Amino acid sequence: MVSKPWLASDEVVDLANELIANHHSALAGAEIAYVMKQKATPAEAEQGLVCTAKKITPLMSVLCGEKDFVVLIAYNLWNELSSDHQRAMLDSALCSCSARIEDGDFVLGDDGHPIWTIKNYDVVAHSEILMRYGVSVLQEAGKRIKEAVKTND
């Protein structure tokens, strides 16, 4: 039986807000939902994607309300990581959340709000995550994730 997703804890939201304040000022006006799901998909686990960001489409907004993004967190993988690794994974998901920019300014929609988009990875991880945490953090997280996947199969 597949368990239903649930809203992430206040601790996760507080960490995300800290990351946004320190590294993602463009997201200060974005409405982001943080949702835990029991398990990563096999593809997410294989790629070490503990947290994934998705843009809320107009159809999804009917169900989610006035949110711009949702960050999905795979509980089975998240729970295996140290707080430093959790920080790096959440930071990476937030790097994917972006606004459309032209000539250095946000492109605004008819409602006057930024047009939000998902930014593709510039490497297997975002380069700014590598700069902040180093390759070793991602390598260690990858090892732990692969171990967790093996024990949970």
Image (tube, grey):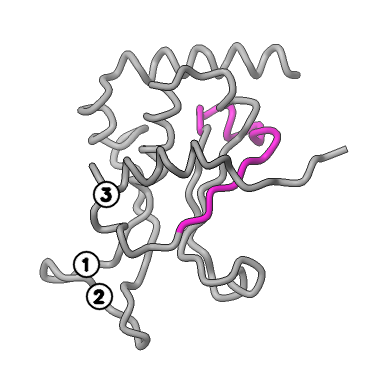
Residue marked by disc 1: 101
Q: Can you tell which of label 2 and label 3 is closer to the viewer?
A: 3
Picture coordinates of residue 63 (x, y %)? 66, 69
Quarter of the image with the N terminus is top right
The tag earlier along the polypeptide, 2 or 1, is 1
Query: At 29% across and 41% down in the image, what residue appears?
Result: 122
Horizontal arrangement in the rendering, residue 102 relative to residue 99 (left or right)? left
Residue marked by disc 3: 24
Q: Crowding at label 1, few (<14), some or many (≥20) Cα neighbours within 10 Å? A: some
Asked whether the beta carbons under mark 2 and mark 1 sit within 8 Å of each other, the answer is: yes
Circle 2: element type: loop
- Out of 114 and 151, give the one closest to the viewer: 114
Horizontal arrangement in the rendering, residue 40 relative to residue 56 (left or right)? right
Label 3 amino acid?
His
Label 1 amino acid?
Ile
Identify whether 51 is placed above or below 20: above
- How far is the residue under mark 2 from the one under mark 3? 17 Å
Circle 1: element type: strand
Picture coordinates of residue 118 (x, y %)? 39, 56
Image quarter of residue 44 = top right
Circle number at residue 107: 2
Q: Which residues are magenta?
A: 32-49
Horizontal arrangement in the rendering, residue 20 relative to residue 63 (left or right)? left
- Out of 90 and 48, give the one closest to the viewer: 90
The tag earlier along the polypeptide, 2 or 3, is 3
Query: At 36% across and 38% down in the image, what residue appears?
Result: 91
